[in-house]
Image (cartoon, grey):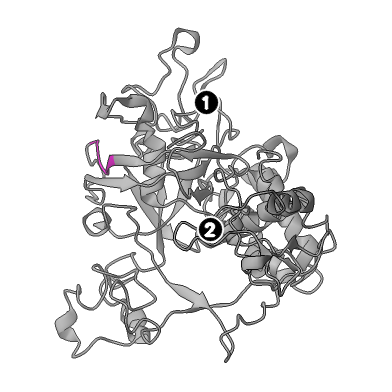
């Protein structure tokens, strides 16, 4: 992170700012900002969004999402379509075992006394390494915790666990920023619900560990206040990338353009049609960790073709033109999207995504945010049609099935005299007849890219597969993403 970029957070610099000789005026009313005389409405200095740890800015743009190779699996689930992706941030590497151990350590330190189930829920499933006709017990015993594997990508984590990790990481990074800027102290005795949560802090539901009472508040009726979103200090949430974002980041066409022309269509995250490095210095070396053929996971002793029998360290091989490592091979990666075979036909051509479920904060009878739950998180509920009575862009909370799986799009809708209740949909499988004719339901999540046990075909970023969000494997990991707010081109851009 850039140290000292936001020193306006400190008490001394804020006082200096608001007590300067002149005040900026409102362009629409003429009133001065940042003065108690006019009520204290503040305009804080802001340059750009800070780049979080391990993140790389992915400058957005348009690209053709979907298939560029022969559909050898005949799934026909990745039909080419042009879409636009907004700029965003992405981890330059997969999340490693050591990253996950840090998460586990914090979880057991904060929750183990009264909520040991939280730690148990966060544990990866190391038994995914077992094979009935193979000897993989060393990976069961050592892969997650032995320091020899600390820089290898974590596996055995399902989609739900990855989302929990993203939420935890958001809070730890924002807590660090507030400590760095002198607002919070190093409060290491957090336990149960008394732990820093970004959303709870914004809503005034976290008051522990404060180094100072808060920032000076220019509202004449208050003396101090918490940092607000309007200050631009704390970072947006870490999350999984969408499928469109992941695929766009993997192609990294920024290195294949002249002006607005793409000079060569990419098959892989690197240029060219080969899977070996063509540079004289590295000639013949594999560009990624994948399975070259039946019984060939790593090549011949003395000349290991990818130098990895299973996974490889997260900084192995060469980054693509965005600076991202292992966007082909090593481990496949979870993304946010719910799987549908014809997603590219249905989704928007701007920020394409299927999986929207809209929620709102629980409030009391007077409209105030309710208290935190026992783990220190704010409580959300699904929005209702009554909440959205005057809204045109959406009405219901769950929009996963929109245009593919809802009552209107069902080929079996004639079977129902009216739209069935949710429990009837669940029992029947509704459109997709889950477990009878299809393995697709609203819990099927997309994962992208090849892994150490896949052939080269899956290293093409356009390929896509799916798995139930509760399932875990020895070949699926993940990396985090974050929204980019403001200018799409980063520091120094327009």
**Residue bounds of the magenta highlight:** 63-69
Q: Is residue 180 above or below residue 36?
A: above
User: Looking at the image, which residue is at 32% across and 54% down?
Assistant: 352
Q: Nearer the viewer, residue 292 or 155?
A: 155
Q: Nearer the viewer, residue 120 or 302?
A: 120
Q: Nearer the viewer, residue 283 or 492?
A: 492
Query: Does residue 432 show up magenta in the picture?
Result: no
Q: Is residue 93 above or below residue 21?
A: above
Q: Quadrant of residue 184?
A: bottom right
Element at label 1: loop
User: Looking at the image, which residue is at 33% across and 36% down?
Assistant: 457
> Label 1 neighbourhood size at 10 Å, few (<14), some (14-19), many (20+)?
some
Q: Is residue 44 above or below residue 301?
A: below
Query: Does residue 66 show up magenta in the picture?
Result: yes
User: Looking at the image, which residue is at 36% across and 84% down?
Assistant: 385
Which residue is tagged 1? 317
Contact? badges 1 and 2 (CB < 8 Å): no
> Label 2 neighbourhood size at 10 Å, few (<14), some (14-19), many (20+)?
many
Regarding residue 469, the answer to whether it shows in the image is yes
Which residue is tagged 2? 158
- Marks 1 and 2, how far apart at CA: 26 Å
Across and down, in percent, residue 103 comes to 69, 54
Relative side of 40 to 352, left or right: right
Across and down, in percent, residue 423 comes to 37, 85
Relative side of 168 to 470, left or right: right
Q: Quadrant of residue 412?
A: bottom left
Across and down, in percent, residue 290 comes to 45, 33
N-terminal-most mark, 1 or 2: 2
């Amino acid at each position: 992170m850039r140290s000292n970029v936001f020193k306006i957070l400190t008490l001394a610099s804020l006082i200096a700012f608001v007590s300067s000789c002149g005040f900026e005026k409102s362009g629409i009313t003429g009133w001065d900002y940042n003065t108690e005389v006019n009520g204290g409405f503040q305009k804080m200095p802001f340059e750009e969004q800070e780049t979080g740890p391990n993140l790389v800015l992915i400058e957005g743009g348009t690209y053709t999402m979907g298939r560029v190779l022969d559909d050898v699996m005949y799934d026909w689930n990745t039909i080419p379509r042009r879409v636009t992706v907004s700029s965003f941030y992405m981890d330059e590497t997969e999340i490693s075992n050591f990253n996950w151990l840090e998460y586990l350590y914090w979880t057991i330190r904060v929750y183990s006394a009264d909520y040991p189930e939280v730690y148990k829920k966060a544990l990866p499933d190391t038994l995914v390494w077992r094979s009935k006709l193979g000897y993989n017990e060393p990976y069961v015993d050592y892969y997650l915790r032995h320091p020899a594997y600390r820089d290898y990508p974590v596996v055995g984590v399902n989609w739900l666990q990855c989302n929990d990790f993203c939420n935890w990481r958001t809070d730890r990074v924002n807590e660090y920023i507030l400590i760095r800027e002198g607002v919070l102290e190093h409060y290491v005795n957090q336990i149960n619900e008394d732990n820093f949560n970004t959303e709870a802090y914004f809503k005034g539901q976290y008051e522990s560990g404060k180094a100072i009472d808060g920032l000076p508040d220019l509202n004449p009726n208050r003396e101090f206040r918490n940092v607000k979103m309007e200050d631009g200090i704390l970072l947006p949430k870490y999350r999984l990338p969408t499928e469109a974002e992941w695929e766009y980041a993997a192609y990294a066409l920024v290195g294949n353009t002249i002006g607005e022309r793409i000079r060569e269509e990419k098959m892989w995250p690197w240029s060219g049609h080969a899977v070996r490095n063509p540079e004289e210095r590295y000639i013949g070396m594999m560009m990624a960790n994948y399975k070259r053929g039946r019984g060939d996971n790593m090549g011949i002793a003395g000349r290991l073709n990818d130098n990895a029998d299973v996974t490889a360290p997260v900084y192995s091989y060469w980054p693509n033109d965005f600076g991202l490592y292992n966007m082909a091979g090593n481990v496949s990666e979870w993304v946010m999207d719910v799987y549908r075979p014809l997603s590219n036909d249905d989704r928007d051509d701007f920020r394409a995504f299927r999986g929207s479920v809209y929620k709102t904060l629980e409030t009391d009878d007077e409209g105030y945010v309710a208290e935190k739950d026992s783990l220190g998180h704010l409580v959300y509920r699904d929005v209702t049609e009554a909440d959205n009575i005057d809204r045109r862009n959406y009405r219901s909370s769950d929009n996963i099935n929109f245009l593919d799986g809802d009552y209107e799009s069902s080929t079996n809708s004639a079977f129902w005299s009216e739209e069935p209740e949710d429990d009837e949909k669940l029992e029947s499988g509704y459109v997709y007849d889950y477990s009878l004719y299809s393995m697709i339901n609203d819990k099927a999540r997309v994962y992208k890219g090849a892994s150490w046990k896949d052939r080269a075909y899956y290293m093409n970023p356009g390929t896509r597969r799916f798995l139930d969000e509760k399932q875990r494997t020895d070949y699926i990991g993940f990396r985090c993403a974050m929204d980019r707010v403001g200018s799409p081109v980063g520091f120094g851009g327009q």
